[in-house]
Amino acid sequence: MAKALDLYDKEEFYRCLQCAICTGSCPVAQVIDGFNPREIILRYMLYGEQEEVLADEKIWCCTTCHACQERCPHEITISGLLTHIMNLAARKGNLPRPLKDNIRLMAETGWSVRATSHSDRVREQLGLKPLKRPDTHEIRSILCEAGLEEILEL
Ligand code: SF4
Ligand code: SF4
């Protein structure tokens, strides 16, 4: 398994000024207590806490909006690394339960939000055609290609 440390230049993170503009710019940090992108990156890249970070469900709060990266005065690839960390955590099976459930739903129905008979009735009342059921075989193939079959027990 590729490690973020191999793919990113550790020196890049020594340039961090600890100015916290990244965390100050993060919309998630403003509403989720304890979510701190600067701290996550430094723990992972410099403090040797890779395993702890990969097991920390807070990493999944990142929406990959890239605001942190855009505003970093040293152009440190914060959101890129956060995405990479989430990928590594997923490969280890460290996915939060709601996310796992959501991916399973997509594998089973092709939708990320369950369509109900009520939604079908409302569509009919509005004169809309019934929703076409997606080809789940294709979706499952993509999920399997991404290595999620075992993790999600599909
Ligand atoms: S904005 Fe950039 S330099 Fe400032 S703390 Fe964040 S990563 Fe470090
Ligand atoms: S990419 Fe993630 S960490 Fe960076 S500002 Fe957006 S939500 Fe915050």
Image: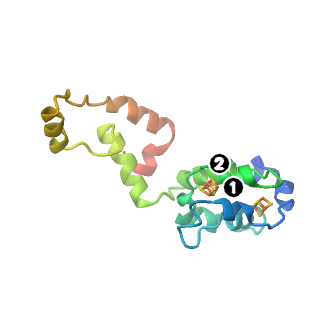
Q: Nearer the viewer, residue 93 or 83?
A: 83
For residue 19, above or below residue 101:
below
Amino acid type of the residue that numbered disc 1 sits on in the rendered structure: Cys
Residue 68 marker: 1
Q: Regarding mark 1 in the picture, which secondary structure is present there?
A: helix
- The residue lying toward the viewer, choosing from 153 and 79, is 79
Query: Which residue sits at x=78%, y=65%?
Result: 46
Say whether residue 104 is visible.
yes
38, 45: nearer the viewer:
38
The residue positioned 56% from the left and 61% from the top of the image is 28
Q: Earlier in the sequence, mark 2 or mark 1?
A: 2
Q: Which residue is mark 2?
A: 1
Q: Position of residue 128 (x, y in %)?
A: 20, 28
Q: Quadrant of ligand 2?
A: bottom right
Q: For this view, does 123 lie left or right of residue 136?
A: left
Left-right relation of 153 to 51: left
How far is disc 2 from disc 1 in space, using C-alphas? Answer: 27 Å
Q: Quadrant of residue 140?
A: top left
Q: Quadrant of residue 62?
A: bottom right
The answer to whether mark 2 is within 8 Å of ligand 2 is no
x then y, percent, for residue 125: 12, 35
As helix, strand or loop, the secondary structure at mark 2 comes to loop
Relative to residue 98, is residue 127 drawn left or right? left
Residue lying farthest to the front in this orientation: 126
Q: Nearer the viewer, residue 147 or 61?
A: 61
Q: Residues within 10 Å of mark 1 (few under 14, many from 20)?
A: many
